[in-house]
Image (cartoon, grey):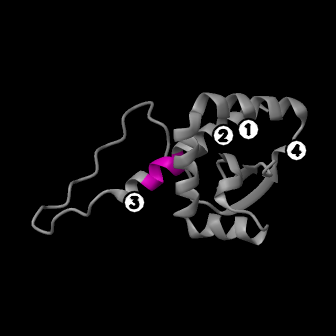
Amino acid sequence: MRKTISLAAAATLLLATAASAQQQPAPQPSEPPASPAPAAPGAQPQAPAIQTVNVVDIEELPEETQTKVNEVIAKRGEDGLQKLRSSIDATPQVKSALEAKGLTSAQVIAASMDTNGALTLITKKAS
């Protein structure tokens, strides 16, 4: 269960970072390309590419997991949730997986990515 919550937080960060990267201006052609910096020791490995997308309603999770997910959501705040949803909307593969279930990013409350590229979106139906 802790792994799921940790992965949800990591996926949120991953998707928010991806959205930020898409908004950065392109470098000017006159600038030489920057050489990639070597990875710092102890740095987190790069997240895997999305291979599969699973959509799960929070009500389908065990109660203990629901509680942990809600704690993570409360700590992240509204700004983090908006970044997650923007990242989802900017990723066609993820957006289409939600649409196939009749959902939108507005119903996503958390995300989790495992090392094999399986992205799990946790949704909550409007009450």
- Disc 1: CA contacts within 10 A as few (<14), some (14-19) or many (>=20): some
Q: CA distance from mark 4 to mark 2?
A: 19 Å
* Amino acid identity at mark 4: Glu
Q: Which residue position holds label 3?
A: 22
- Classified by dominant secondary structure, the portion drawn in magenta counts as helix
Q: Tell me which label, 2 or 3, sits earlier in the chain.
A: 2
The span from disc 3 to disc 4 (Cα, nearest Å) is 33 Å
The three-letter code of the residue at mark 3 reads: Gln
Residue at point 58% right, 40% down? Answer: 10
Residue at x 71%, y 35% (from the top left corner):
5
Q: Residue at x 82, y 33 (%)?
A: 65
Q: Is residue 16 magenta?
A: yes
Q: Is residue 106 above or below residue 59?
A: below
Query: Residue under circle 2?
Result: 7
**Callouts 2 and 1 close, C-beta under 8 Å:** yes
Query: Magenta region: which residues?
Result: 14-19
Q: Which residue is mark 4?
A: 59
Q: Are the residues at dot 1 and dot 4 in contact (C-beta closer than 8 Å)?
A: no
Q: CA distance from mark 2 to mark 1?
A: 5 Å
